[in-house]
Amino acid sequence: EILHELIEYTVIHFAVEESLFRIFHYPGTEAHTHHHDELKAQVLDIQKKVKQGEAEVNTELLMFLKKWLTNHILQEDKLYGPFLLKQGVKSSWSEKSWLGRIWRGK
């Protein structure tokens, strides 16, 4: 169930970001989307290994989450916040979402 929720969150998180990039013509779209593709492949690989009994969810999943949370959300995602704010995206729109936490560095 946790793995399913992670995959669902990952797909939604990336889809929202990529939609914003297209709407506002973010110059870093290609590189950021490539990073998304790599992360999605990792999640799907973990899911496959778990289903086949080749991996334990706890160890591999926790390592992936740590890497993803520290490297992607706290570093990569913070790069587009200032750009979107300059394009007119209101920070108040994100107060109740993950975007607000990213842009505020929390």
Image: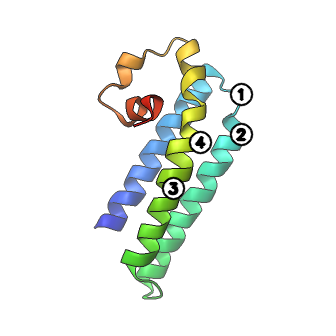
Q: CA distance from mark 1 to mark 4?
A: 14 Å
The residue positioned 42% from the left and 88% from the top of the image is 53
Amino acid, disc 1: Pro
Badge 1 or badge 4: first in the primary sequence: 1
Badge 2 or badge 4: first in the primary sequence: 2
Say what secondary structure mark 4 lies in: helix
Say whether residue 1 is left or right of residue 9: left
Q: CA distance from mark 1 to mark 3?
A: 22 Å
Q: CA distance from mark 2 to mark 3?
A: 19 Å
Check disc 1 and report the residue beneath it.
27
Q: Say which of marks 2 and 4 sits in front.
A: 4
Q: CA distance from mark 2 to mark 1?
A: 8 Å
In the displayed structure, 84 sits above or below 12; it is above
Check disc 3 and report the residue beneath it.
68
Amino acid, disc 4: Glu
Amino acid, disc 3: Trp
Check disc 4 and report the residue beneath it.
76
The residue positioned 56% from the left and 65% from the top of the image is 42
Q: Are marks 2 and 3 in contact (CB under 8 Å)?
A: no
Q: Are marks 1 and 4 in contact (CB under 8 Å)?
A: no
Q: Say which of marks 2 and 3 sits in front.
A: 3
Check disc 2 and report the residue beneath it.
30
Q: CA distance from mark 2 to mark 4?
A: 13 Å
